[in-house]
Amino acid sequence: MVQKNKSAEKLKELGEKVVKDISKNKNPNIIVPIRALSNVIFNERTRTLELGDKTSTRYFFNIAHAKKFVQTIEIASISKDLILEDKHASLRDVFYMAKRTIPGTNVDLVYEQSESDDIIEDLELITGNSREQLYINANKNGSIVGKVTIEDAGDTIRWDKLGSGGWSIPSNVENIKFKKVDAKYIIYMEKAAVWERLNEDKFWDKQNCIIISSQGQTTRGIRRLLQRLYEEFKLPIYVLTDFDAYGFYIYSVIKYGSINLAHASERLAIPSVKFLGITSNDIEKYGLKKHFIKLKDHDISRLKQLSEYEWFKDNKSWQKEFKTMKQYGSKAEIQALSSRGISFISDTYLPEKIKNKDFLE
Amino acid sequence: MKEVLIAETLAKEQKSISISEFFLKNRHLLGFDNPTRALMMVVKEAVDNSLDACTEIKVLPEIKVEINQINENRFTIIVEDNGPGIVKQQIPNIFGKLLYGSKFHRLRQSRGQQGIGISAAVLYSQLTTGKSTKIYSRIGSKKPAHYFELQIDTKKNEPNVIKDNEIEWDKDQGTKVEIEIEGRYLKGKQSVDEYIKQTAIVNPHATFIYTNPEKEKYEYLRVTDQLPHEAKEIKPHPYGIEIGQLMKMIQDTRANTIQGFLKSEFSRISDLVSKEICDKAKLNQNEKPKKLGHKEIELLFNSLQEVKIMAPPSDCLSPITSELLEKGLRKEISADFYVATTRSPSVYRGMPFVIETAIAYGGELEKESQVRLMRFANRVPLLYQQGACAITEAVSETSWKSYGLQQSGGNIPNGPVIILVHISSVWVPFTNEAKEAIAHYDEIIKEIKLGLQECGRKLNVYINKNIKSKEQKEKISLFEKYIPELASSLSNLTGSNKMEVEENLRKLLKKELPALEVENGAKE
């Protein structure tokens, strides 16, 4: 309750500052920390990304800022109402709550959900409260299975008794209690389809591990859950993604934190995770070249960006991956392994990789 | 013993099905999959034929298209041209026999590629209405005009002539075809109306007079007397062939040596190149080509793909030219700005092609919606399967934000714009037989992007000069509308008085206005 009032109070303070500017006949402004590579610092000691102290000032009377300025105040007001009414809304809900056509124009206050999502991340930084503290949740995303028992909202749940779908990971995992965890390690994978394959093969049972997947981007809920499992049970975590720039970045986000959410690295980053595959060695060793997909222009430019990130710049093994991919001019999906047989991944590939400790750092 | 018997029984049941029968069962392959599309396909096939015929004898085309609605789902399509006409003996074959035509075996840019078009329309008519197709044709003022009524014998793939008369016709030269079909007429992006309009844009040397089923008459007049430059026929280029084709060429050749065969049947093979090819394949270039065994042909084929050979000549292509493309666009689309460009010829799989792109911006074009994309192959509009087309991919992958348009993710951009892309090639690679989407060859996509970028840069200059300042003014006027919104959000957030905040903001606006007007929309 105390926290609740504090979050609402922070939002109100932001509004009051703006009202004060206006009454003083001053162009109202909001100071927002910059969330971009230019303001991200790689902390050599903690091995995670941190947000720097660069800020930008958002003015209402500025052609390029005006709409964003109104969006910021509007969404702050929506969030305040949510907190006071004690109701949690999804990112999508907030988008619709803010979306409207401004009378007398054909301009929508927010046009796409990405705009309101962006403002919510700004508000986290402006107020120093996390999204959850602003009463805004992301969608459930990702599945997990393993010999684990948890307690969630008063219910006791066994992850190994949930059939083919596994447990869906909510956006907020702060209040989950782990009752029993019986596993030697965790594999996180980018592809839900691969997870389904491993689950059907009962890989987690045979190998005594936990498997977890998202569909594409790793959400905060998943990252926080992984971090908690690591910190509370010291389970090693291995990341399995496609052999492409986007897959590599997924690993980078889990390990070091993301550029966009650098301010939350402390709660999300896990510097000890290791990259299991798909690596260029796997490509050679398992003959995946015939399943190559040609790199497009955006793949190549993304690859270049990755190789220039401070946390990859001096990492020889990763630079080798980037260089090899560029030489191939191609990428490959995890599912390329299926060409060696549908269960090749669970019977051979993963056990071999883990036994030989064939990882990238 | 028993097995032989089964085989014999089976043999009795196995019979070759005629091409006509095959297409009867697979009409969707040809684009006749629904009544709306069928109507368009019939018009398209007839108009394509007329335009190609006129080009052949260097006559400025004048094409009349008329669609009459007989009842709810029945239409007669009449297409008349001033082309060369068709000699009497050929009329039944051209209209009444599938896969008959002269275009299939030669490499030169033309609209139809496989001679399946117009006879498929005749077949569709017969299938849906049971009616015969009527053809009028005359090859010169001194020759009689002929009138035919035709059907297709689907079992034999042969024309079935119902009527064959000499008639009086007020026309000196040309062909007119009348086809009755079951169809549906709709307006919109995939309509016959749109097809004719787009055809007029990319054929600025042609006049079209079109009467739609609602009796509305449109005249699309030519804006140039310049005929498209004549496309030369070329020999295949080694990089473009398949092994089966090579075998057939070896079987058919009159050359006595491999060297002679390579030089006479392919383009860009000299004595030197021929020697290199034979050396690489470990063949004696003086050997008779017909003596080559399967294995040796395979060696020859591989070597043909590996040896470096000059790109094929591009005089087999006839692009519209940027100047005429712009003229064509100007006459049919009312916009503020036009730009067009013709790329230099390029090659995919040994086939030469040319990309042309054009952009129209502003004017009466719709502001808030997605850009309209017009796709063409050898001057024929492609109205269906936009999502599957390489042109769409190239447009989506171009970064339009740098050229002043809005674009979210890898989508087609938004704005008051028409983007036109035309590919000319001796062999346009379609994704399927309906010929509505271009296959995704890297070389083609790259050329389209380069063309779009060239137009994009010019568009950007125009937008910066003329539009940005106007938009700036519009945006300033937006502040008045933003003020009540901001005031109401603030009052909800802080409990402050909405009217008071609003009033203060209005005062502030007056003070800030001069600064806003000089500001160039500085970035955060």
Image (cartoon, rainbow, N blue to C red):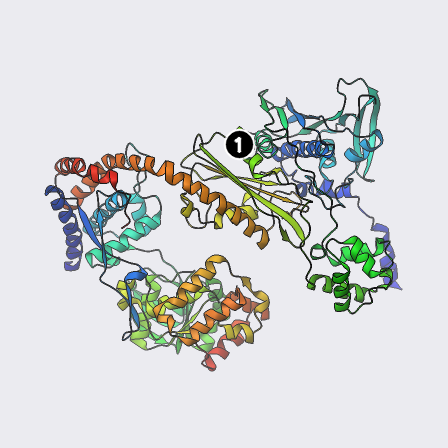
Place of residue A154 in the rendered image (x, y in percent of width and height, measured from the top left)? 28, 63
Residue furthest to the right: B1
Above or below: residue A100 compared with residue A314: above
Residue B511 seen: yes
Residue placed under numbered mark 1 in the picture: B188
Place of residue A339 in the rendered image (x, y in percent of width and height, measured from the top left)? 59, 68
Residue B393 seen: no
Pick the residue in front: A222 or A286: A286
Above or below: residue A36 compared with residue A160: above
Q: Chain of mark 1?
A: B
Say which quadrant the C terminus of chain A sits in: bottom left
Q: Quadrant of residue B6?
A: bottom right
Say which quadrant the N terminus of chain A sits in: bottom left
Q: Quadrant of residue B46?
A: top right
Is A62 on the left or on the right of B138, as rendered? left
Name the kind of residue labelled 1 in the image. Answer: Gly
Q: Quadrant of residue B341?
A: top right
Residue at x-position 16% and y-position 51%:
A14
**Count of numbered circles in the view:** 1
Q: Tag 1's secondary structure?
A: loop
Is A34 on the left or on the right of B372, as rendered? left
Place of residue B420 in the rendered image (x, y in percent of width and height, measured from the top left)? 53, 39
